Image (cartoon, grey):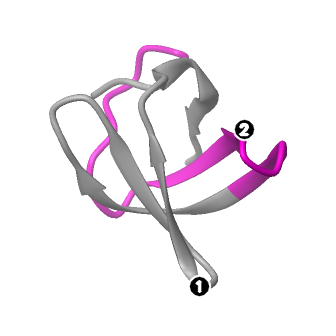
Amino acid sequence: MKDSRGRHILIGDRVKVLWNFDNKIHVKDIIKIGRKHVEVDITLRRISIYDHTKITKLR
């Protein structure tokens, strides 16, 4: 999967994610990549993102 800037995302990459549920930006590591979604683990829950335009890979 690619992020909003077109860079490839892999498990363990640090990303910045805008999550619609709470409308906040979360900075965490990717724990799982599916065919159409990415999962990020935040405190007490996992975020599943299907829209790659809301994910930005950090260095």
Residue 34 at x, y percent in the picture = 19, 43
Q: Which residues are magenta?
A: 4-26
- On screen, residue 27 versus residue 24, left or right, reads left
Looking at marks 1 and 2 on the same chain, the residue that comes earlier in the sequence is marked by: 2
Residue at point 42% right, 14% down?
Answer: 6
**Quarter of the rendering containing residue 45:** bottom right
Quadrant location of the N terminus in the rendered image:
top left
How many residues crowd mark 2 within 10 Å: few (<14), some (14–19), many (20+)?
Answer: few
The circle drawn on residue 20 is 2
How many numbered marks have been drawn onto this rendered protein structure? Answer: 2
Q: Amino acid at mark 2?
A: Asn
Residue 31 at x, y percent in the picture = 33, 65
> Which residue corresponds to mark 1?
44
- On screen, residue 10 versus residue 43, left or right, reads left
**Quarter of the rendering containing residue 42:** bottom right
For label 1, the SS is: loop
- On screen, residue 47 versus residue 32, left or right, reads right
Residue at point 84% right, 42% down?
Answer: 23
Q: CA distance from mark 1 to mark 2?
A: 17 Å
How many residues crowd mark 1 within 10 Å: few (<14), some (14–19), many (20+)?
Answer: few
The circle drawn on residue 19 is none
For label 2, the SS is: loop
Residue at point 56% right, 18% down?
Answer: 53
In terms of secondary structure, what is the magenta stretch mainly? loop
Q: Is 12 contained in the magenta span?
A: yes
Residue 9 at x, y percent in the picture = 33, 39
**Quarter of the rendering containing residue 56:** top right
Height in image: 26 above or below 23? below
